[in-house]
Amino acid sequence: MEQMVRTGLLYDFYGGLLTEKQRRTMELYYLENWSLTEIAAEAGVSKQAVHDLLHRSERIIEDLEQKLGLLQRFLDQQTSLNQISRKLQQVLVSLPEPSPNHKILMEINQQILDMAEAEME
């Protein structure tokens, strides 16, 4: 997984545990795509101070992930939901469409897909 995406996901899970200053800096950098220079000018600090704060914040959320594993659990669940959906699709293809089970399985598959999509938001 690309590091920027991973950090963004880690922020989604653990950002609430950071200080307001850490959260704001990470949001500007990762979500609003501000440069270190822009963030430094906005905060009235040096570019190095912003870099250090980002590095510390990233380390904090990585440490939290190592201890709690919420992101990995989420990714594992997404993988499982996708595998279940693919297997269910295989079953659906083998059933005749007028079958009452076909409609029920289609609804179940849609619920699985909806769950996977809702968790990604």
Image (cartoon, rainbow, N blue to C red):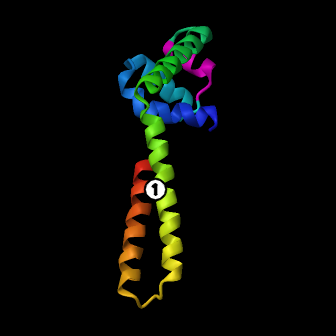
User: Which region is colored magenta?
Assistant: 34-43
Asked if residue 76 is positioned above or below residue 101 in the image, the reply reads above
Q: Is residue 77 visible?
A: yes
Q: Quadrant of the N terminus?
A: top right
Residue 121 in sight from this viewpoint: no
Q: Give me the residue at 47% from left, 69% from top.
A: 88
- Residue 15 lies, in percent from the top left, at 41, 27
Q: Main secondary structure of the magenta part?
A: helix
Give, as a three-letter code, the residue at label 1: Leu
Q: Nearer the viewer, residue 62 or 38?
A: 62
Read off the residue under disc 1. Answer: 81
Where is 107 relative to 66, above or below? below
Task: List the single residue furthest toward the bottom.
Answer: 98
Question: Is residue 48 in the magenta section?
Answer: no
Q: Is residue 103 above or below residue 68?
A: below
Q: Is residue 7 left or right of residue 104?
A: right
Indicate the position of residue 35 as horizontal and vertical percent values: 62, 24
Within-10-Å neighbours for mark 1: few <14, some 14–19, many 20+: some
**Image quarter of residue 6:** top right
Q: Position of residue 42 (x, y in %)?
A: 52, 18
Residue at point 47% right, 18% down? 60
Badge 1 element: helix
Q: Is residue 40 magenta?
A: yes
Q: Nearer the viewer, residue 64 or 52?
A: 64
Asked if 92 appears above or below 67 in the picture, the reply is below
Identified at 51% across, 66% down, the residue is: 87
Query: For the point 56% across and 11% down, which residue is it?
Result: 52
